[in-house]
Amino acid sequence: MSVADIEAASTATSRAQKLSIRGLNKSFGAVHVVKDLSIDVEPGEFLVLLGPSGCGKTTGLRMIAGLEVADSGQIVLGDSDVTSVLPKYRDVAMVFQSYALYPHKTVADNIGFPLKVRGLPIEQRAAAVREAAAQVHMDDYLDRYPRQLSGGQRQRVALARAIVRRPSVFLMDEPLSNLDAKLRGYMRAELKHMQHELGVTTVYVTHDQVEAMTLAHRVAIMDEGVLQQIGTPRDVYDRPANLFVAGFMGSPSMNFIRGSVENGRFESHGVSLPLVDAAPGGDVVMGFRPEDAQVVDPGAGLFDAKVFTAELTGDVTLVTVALGDTSLAVKMPKEYEVDYDSAVAVTLPLPQAFLFDARSGQRLPARFAEVAR
Amino acid sequence: MTFGDPTQRARGSSGIGRFFEAPQIGRMSPASRLIVYSLLLFWSAFVLFPLYWIVITSVKLPIDVNDGPAYLPFIDFAPNMHAWRDLLVLDLAETVKPYRNSVIIALFATIACMLIGSMAAYALARIEYKPKFGTILLFVVAMVGASVSVGIWGVDWRLAAASAGAIFVLLARALGRRFKRSVGNGDILFWMISQRILPPVVTVVPVYMMFQSVRLLDTHFALIVTYTVVNLPIVVWLMYDFFSGIPKDLEESAQLDGASRLTVFYEIVLPLARTGLAATTLLVLIFSWNEYVVALFLSTTNAQTMPILVAAMNGGEKGVLWWKMCVVIIIMIIPVVLMALVLQRFISKGILLGAVKG
Ligand SMILES: Nc1ncnc2c1ncn2[C@@H]1O[C@H](COP(=O)(O)OP(=O)(O)OP(=O)(O)O)[C@@H](O)[C@H]1O
Ligand SMILES: [Mg+2]
């Protein structure tokens, strides 16, 4: 889906606001946590901020909420610059990584709190609370206190408290992290549907790439405070901008073979493959996804290797082969069986492989040529 | 029990084995329960006996007190309400006045102390202060300069205060830049509690002279102000801990929900700190209620408090009037016990359960 599609889809909801972050920086003492972060979130877009633990996702979100003051940069919501606006005037709702439920208030009072401080009459408030609670399937627990709920239930109350009013922006900090796999899958669908229905601009933080792929209109991938790539899930998966993104997206992660470009060919220990657009010589890394490759008989593939392990994970057999001291993962059908240490070869449709600059990590435009076997 | 637990099965479930074994984790075996309860019983008797003694002494005749110990009413001696009658009927006005003084002073001192102290503690727990050494030094110098010029050179105090203020404001930035080192919240907290290191007796004479010079001796106001100031460090110290224990996320979440700082304080912080508030209130109340040394110096007739009345039962040519003293002590204890019972309802553990994960 392109940005234009997202805009078209969201015109139905007039309240959706555009959120622009420009050149945001934040340091805690000597640690530069968020570096020059710039993102434009379209009205009604579901943007997922993805990155490993400690990369500055929460800090970025807190700056958007106004809970953390940016050292430099600008935050624009709709038509107004909110960089120095107090959190309570920003009209954003946030689901905290820690839920932050008010322990002395019942579920109903927790969900109704945003409406209460806005002075909504009590009957209207009760109706809105019931509706929001029903959306997260917590309407049977309205009289309970947070301490009487399970982790997943608390998380859902936190969600309900965010959706009970219609803010300009939803900020969600790993709101599904504490749920079991089944409930997480269910809530993921529920969330996606809800966001689509409400059409509220959403920034969603997670370090779970499956969540990112399934929920996002666009994914923004961060590492060590730096935005690595932003694009649709398909984009970042099929055209990773650099080694970090390539390795972070996908499970198991992409296979990498270090090598160099010599005479228009990729050369590595026991591997020699032709390239189409002759890349400048130098150290490079070849990358390909486990599901693109296949294990075949020795001599029948692009390069020979030795089987290290084969694991049945349920729907596939994950074969790990050793090429010199590099280990490569290959997804094979679940019926596939092979002996450890047996000699095999690996093959793959070469145009689906990537080439990265070994030093900068950037993906190179050069592609592999088709090899006739 | 269907599944006998392994230790029990190993030893067999003989009567003796059961006696020394806990039925569950967190429960006590009958043997340890016996020991614990006997110790507790002994300690309760130890603590409660003086109270018992006070109660029976208040209904003894002087002769029963002076002729050696008499332990049991109706058996060792005949109870007599003469001391109660003296204090609560004949000299009622004399008893009620210090009682009223005590109530007024303790109540207002506690309220003022809790209001100011908990706000200070909240600020220290949530806002990071970094006053520069230079600024603090300048403030002290300006204060001393102003006091000296008023006290010794007889400068008009308004002029002195205004010029000290002006000098401070003008030089604060420049000096602050010179002396970069600053103090933090921890230092401020320690400075506050350090005010209690001096024994009160040391400070009471200067305090006396201060109130003398503003002609406020023997007034409620003097005692209220003194008690407030003396108890503030304790309130700040204790409440700081309670406020720090409230997850910051809760307040931030409330802010994002649209609450103002004041709403956050009243809706979120105060209810969650109520255990601390109740405990601290009780502590401050008891301190102010029972305080003796300061009251002795600052009050003579009008503002006399109950502890002074108790002390007044001692001495004179008739010796100690034990029976009357005991009556006064009993009526002094009653309101504190009542307060404790009321405030106990607010003291609950686990109030923060369920707020944040982990
Ligand atoms: N208040 C703070 N003071 C000092 N350092 C902080 C503070 N908050 C965060 N950091 C640091 O900033 C970095 C980024 O933290 P942040 O919470 O944004 O990570 P995150 O991406 O949300 O990680 P996670 O996925 O584990 O939640 C971390 O190295 C953390 O130690
Ligand atoms: Mg985080």
Image (cartoon, rainbow, N blue to C red):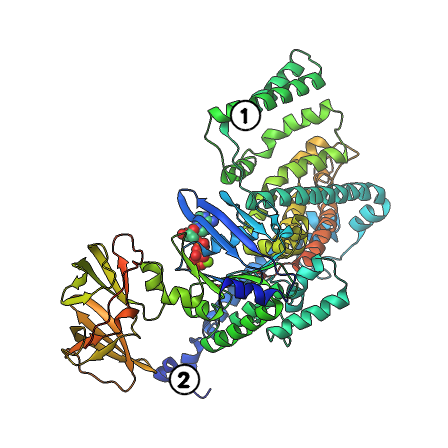
- In the shown orientation, is residue A53 left or right of residue B304? left
Residue A357 in view (yes/no): yes
Which x, y percent locates residue B337?
69, 55
Residue under circle 1? B173
Which x, y percent locates residue A272?
16, 66
Q: Which mark is residue B294?
A: none
Task: Tell which tag, 2 or 1, sits nearer the viewer.
Answer: 1
- In the shown orientation, is residue A159 left or right of residue A123? left
Amino acid on which the number 2 mark rests in the picture: Ser
In this view, the residue in front, B350 or B260, is B260
Residue at 68% over, 69% down: A129
Residue under circle 2? B14
Residue B69 in view (yes/no): no
Instruction: Say whether mark 1 and mark 2 are on the same chain.
Output: yes
Which x, y percent locates residue B250?
58, 56
Q: Chain of mark 1?
A: B
Residue furthest bottom as drawn = B2
In this view, the residue in front, B152 or A57, is A57
In this view, the residue in front, A293 or A108, is A293
Query: For the residue carrying disc 1, how many other residues have a C-alpha within 10 Å: few (<14), some (14-19), or many (20+)?
Result: few
Q: How many marks?
A: 2
Ligand 1 contact, mark 2 (Cβ < 8 Å): no
Looking at the image, is B259 positioned above or below residue A133? above
CA gap between label 2 and label 1 equals 81 Å
Amino acid on which the number 1 mark rests in the picture: Arg
Q: Earlier in the sequence, mark 2 or mark 1?
A: 2
- Local SS, label 2: loop
- Local SS, label 1: helix
